[in-house]
Amino acid sequence: MPAKKRGGRRVDFRQVKEQVRFEQVLQYYGLLDGLRRKGEELVGYCPLHDERRYNKDAFSVNTARNIFHCFACGASGNVLDFVCQRENLEPREAALALQERFLSDQPEAAKERQPRQRAKEREDAKSAEASEDQVSEGGPVLVNPPLTFELKNLDSKHPYPNDRGLDQKAIATFGLGYCNRGLMQGRIVIPLHNERGELVGYAGRWPGEPPEGEPKYKFPPKFHKSGVLFNLHRIDASEAQDKGLIVVEGFFGVFRLWQSQFYNVVALMGTALTPEQERLLLGVLGERGKVVLLLDNDEPGREATARIVERLVGKVVVRVVDLGAASEPEELSVKQAQELLSLAR
């Protein structure tokens, strides 16, 4: 098959299929250790539909022929087909991703890089190197590299976000949509960005109560929540320094407050404020900044609030908002949110 070139980026489909080994792809996704070797095959649960009711050896990879097949969901093909299904990508996008991940050190691929892209890669490498050298509370800062792809063909009309009180403007702003293929199949995906606005991952929320054995939220393998404050890239720094930053636990707390016109809100994606998240907060707020804590009204939320206050006191002004009868920020009406947050000014 001849190589194709569009928009200055050359894709050699045959080279990708022949030279990218399935073991490399499985290792990249963190799946290799979960499979068992049987001669020339790797077998285990299928990572495409993530369904454990089927035979544990339903998924197999023939390492000699560099192809896969799942007897449960029927998926099969080569490394390109696998990545298309796992990341919900078009073939050209998947081929580009594989080429950049595994073949970029080859002369032909290196020749095709644009000067601006090479400069950006050098800058990213320096940034990542500097970040890895930072040690906080006994360990290095964990960095999420920017993705080389975006999930396509998401269904933004799925009823679940509406059922949770979100309007179409919020759904479009945060890029929410139902995913029917790949790792996030069957979930509402939420794009995740670093503080520079680079896409670094997706979170997948099961629409409703998940079946037994399924988590409510799924994150990509090797994604570090600790290095991201959700929604920070949308924050206006001058406004944050003037009004402070509202900190909640989860995504839907951000969505609800954003719809209530509180745009200076970020989420921890959990109850812990990590050292890296603290650094991001202080970097935006400066020395005289203010943090408004609006964590869930339960025991873990209250304990987390106390820990965060202890860590931030003396560094920034900290205000704690009592949710009253509400158990989480998502339950607040626009009026209730405005009344509670006005007390924290």
Image (cartoon, helix red, strand yellow):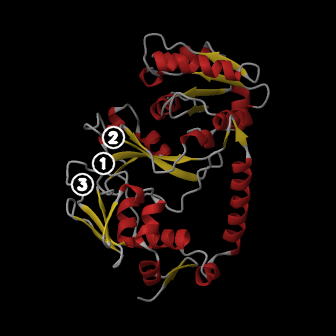
| Marks 2 & 1, CB-CB < 8 Å contact | yes
Relative horizontal placement of residue 253, taking residue 187 as reference (left or right): right
Neighbour tally class for label 3: few under 14, some 14-19, many 20 plus, Cα within 10 Å: some
The residue lying furthest to the right in this view is: 287
Looking at the picture, how far across and down is residue 339, in whole percent? Answer: 54, 14
| Tag 1 residue | 186
Mark seen at residue 56: 3
| Tag 2 residue | 206
- Quadrant for the C terminus in the image: top right
Q: Residue type at mark 3: give it.
A: Lys
Q: Residue type at mark 1: give it.
A: Gly
Relative horizontal placement of residue 119, taking residue 300 as reference (left or right): right
Can residue 88 be spotted in the picture?
A: yes
Q: Is residue 186 above or below residue 259?
A: below
| Of callouts 2 and 1, the N-terminal one | 1
| Of callouts 3 and 1, the N-terminal one | 3
Q: Is residue 227 above or below residue 256?
A: below
Distance in Å between CA atoms under marks 2 and 1: 7 Å
Q: Which one is in front in this view, the residue at disc 3 or the one at disc 1?
A: 3
Looking at the picture, how far across and down is residue 184, in whole percent? Answer: 37, 51
Quarter assignment of residue 36: bottom left
Q: Which one is in front, 208 or 44?
A: 44
> Residue shown at 54%/68% (left/top)?
101
Q: Is residue 247 above or below residue 227?
A: above
Distance in Å between CA atoms under marks 3 and 1: 21 Å
Q: Which one is in front in this view, the residue at disc 2 or the one at disc 3?
A: 3
